[in-house]
Image: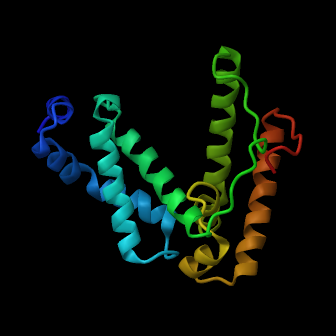
């Protein structure tokens, strides 16, 4: 079913449209969910989280836009998986003032954010395996060090050391790119 048609039917409460959405995006949603959960929770929890994502899509069908469905599902999947880890006591809450970004209404701030994202992406890519994998698992998927250590087959202290070195490399990359390090991120 074509995405625009699927969304129209989904908004009208057509169960077949939800099935089509699940058929098309379940592998992607499951990959995002398991990327966050790792091996920290039982398989049934991952399946529940993935199902919750599609329930959210059904409940918020009016929010889904053609061409943006995959991104919306991925964001919801990541957030629901993080919430599941948090509920299980496996994810530490983030401090609200850890990272202050310029206002979203500020065009100059958007340019700065795009530059920082590009520099960070290059720096993370430059880490190379397995450091890049460790860094992405920890900071993007917010997996605990223990889960990462098991997944990559390293002692927890080695994972912590690689994270510390990775942070230093990212800090250096930002500073070389002209961004002032003020301690807020690292």
The residue lying at 31 percent from left, 58 percent from top is 51
In this orientation, which residue lies closer to the viewer: 57 or 122? 57
> From the viewer's perspective, is residue 52 above or below residue 61?
below
Quadrant of residue 136 within the rendered picture = bottom right
User: Which image quadrant for residue 34?
Assistant: bottom left
Q: Position of residue 167 (x, y in %)?
A: 77, 56
Q: Is residue 100 above or below residue 103?
A: below
Quarter residue 16 falls in: top left
Indicate the position of residue 8 as horizontal and vertical percent values: 17, 28
Q: What colour scheme governs how the chains and residues are painted in the rendered image of this protein?
A: rainbow
- Quadrant holding the N terminus: top left
The reply, left or right, for residue 138 in relation to residue 72 is right
Residue 6: x and y in percent read 16, 35
Instruction: Please indicate whether residue 178 sits to the left or right of residue 45 in the image.
Output: right
Q: Position of residue 67 (x, y in %)?
A: 31, 31
The residue sitting at 27% across, 56% down in the picture is 26
Which residue is pictured at 64% across the width and 56% down the height?
139
Q: Nearer the viewer, residue 78 or 112?
A: 78
| 109 displayed left or right of 81 | right
Foreground pick, 126 / 100: 100
Left or right of 11: which side holds 165? right
Residue at the outermost right position: 182
Q: How many callouts does the rendering have?
A: 0
Q: Residue at x 58, y 75 (%)?
A: 147
Asked whether 172 or 92 is in front, the reply is 92
């Amino acid at each position: 079913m074509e995405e625009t048609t699927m969304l129209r039917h989904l908004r009208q409460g057509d169960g077949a449209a939800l099935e089509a959405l699940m058929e098309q995006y379940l592998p992607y949603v499951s990959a995002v969910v398991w990327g966050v959960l790792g091996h920290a929770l039982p398989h049934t929890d991952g399946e529940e989280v993935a199902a919750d994502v599609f329930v959210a899509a059904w409940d918020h069908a009016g929010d889904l836009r053609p061409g943006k469905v995959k991104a919306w599902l991925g964001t919801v999947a990541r957030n629901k998986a993080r919430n599941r880890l948090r509920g299980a006591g496996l994810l530490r809450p983030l401090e609200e003032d850890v990272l202050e970004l310029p206002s979203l209404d500020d065009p100059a701030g958007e340019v700065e954010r795009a530059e920082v994202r590009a520099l960070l992406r290059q720096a993370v890519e430059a880490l190379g395996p397995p450091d890049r994998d460790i860094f992405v698992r920890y900071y993007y998927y917010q997996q605990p060090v223990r889960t990462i250590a098991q997944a990559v087959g390293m002692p927890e202290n080695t994972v912590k050391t690689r994270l510390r070195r990775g942070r230093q490399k990212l800090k250096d990359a930002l500073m070389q790119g002209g961004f002032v390090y003020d301690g807020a991120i690292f």
